[in-house]
Image (cartoon, helix red, strand yellow):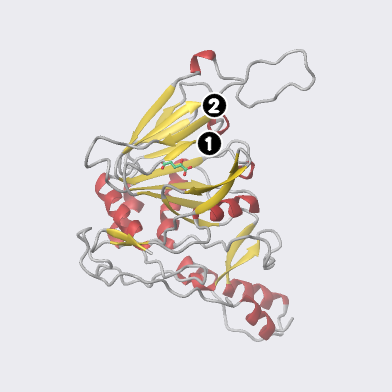
Amino acid sequence: MSKRTLDAFFKPKTTTPPTKRPKPTPTADNSPPHSTEDITAPDTHPSYPSPIPQLPSHISIALTHGTPAKEPRAINNQPDLDLLYFQPYITRPTANELFKFLRRELPFYRVKYTIKRGGIETEINTPRYTTVFGVDDTSQFTSYRDIKSKNKNEDEDDEDETTNPNENSINSSSNLSLTETTSKTPIRNTKYQYTPRPIPTCLNQLKARVEAATGSRYNSCLVNYYSSGNDSIAFHSDDERFLGASPDIASLSLGGEREFVMKHKPVPPRHTGSTTSLTSTSTSASPSTAGTTLKFPLSSGDMILMRGSTQSNWLHSIPKRKGRSGEAVEGRINITFRRAMVPAGTNNYYRYNVGDGGVWRWDGGRGRWFV
Ligand SMILES: O=C(O)CCC(=O)C(=O)O
């Protein structure tokens, strides 16, 4: 294939029109939308509805030199439970700054989808604002320059500009294209149902720190925003097969305090004398676990790492929180860092965290969301 044809192939074809952004008025967050220290260009990519700024340098420095703020506590005193509880992972002042930055700068969505309940199509309105970045292990974002460089090496006669592998930074993310991880060839257009988006530098920096603290690798950042104590997430486990058998999931809290509640999955009664007996990953639970509910307060900057057999045996939730004024209405961001192994994970994450609706933005000046 000629260089000209390859260039045309890899260049992003369409650019999503930028979404409306609030005028840069002084914000209720007490910080200008872009402080004077933030002079580095924002990340841009055709899959982003608008550019995503770099972390202010004081946050970036605090993350690099100040995390983990405290060594974690291992919680493994219940059957099948294996947690690391960082209380906190990021100091409260930095966590609150990071909360305001991410609420202001990330594109959020309010996803609606339908499921069949008792044979009837039911519309579900996700009771949170959500967003997601990243792609499963079978694909990777590769810089346009690197692809050109690889092609150049295969065709030494082709004249091309010199490439610098160090420029494969997300900062030049408009250059990033999806390639197959093993073959390094461009992915098929039909591989994903939704367009995966590279993790912007601000979240990538955070991910790198979390990886160092937890000893795990992640390829996806899922972000939830709970605008008040009325927003919640029901009991569930992140036990999808696309995460592998015993996934590590790091869950970071920023902003308002909420309670993280866990309970063991129901243990099916022991079934004997049948060749079609149920199999379950939960059979190791002792009777004393049944009905045990664990509650972990999550303040701004706290992080819980769920690992090992936790997801296959325990459910977790953030229940609604009422009655304690102030805390109950304060916004909260939760970021989960996960590693999806196969495209089903990417499809699932984008379907339920981005979907097909409009982009929601936080207007700090007015203290409200707009679409
Ligand atoms: O908000 C939280 O702390 C939990 C989020 C969660 O459970 C999830 O995203 O699956």
Q: Position of residue 241 (x, y in %)?
A: 64, 41
Indicate the secondary structure of the residue bearing disc 1.
loop
Q: Is residue 72 visible?
A: no
The residue nearer to you, when weighing 41 against 258, is 258
Q: Residue furthest right?
A: 275
**The residue at label 1 has a CB less than 8 Å from ligand 1:** no
Ligand 1, by image quadrant, is top left
- For label 2, the residue is 265
Please say if the residues under marks 2 and 1 sit with CB atoms less than 8 Å apart: yes
Q: Residue at x 23, y 58 (%)?
A: 29
Q: Which residue is mark 1?
A: 237
Picture layout, residue 11 above or below residue 296: below
| Residue 150 picture quarter | bottom right
Q: Is residue 4 visible?
A: yes
Q: Is residue 271 above or below residue 245?
A: above
Q: Is residue 367 left or right of residue 283?
A: left
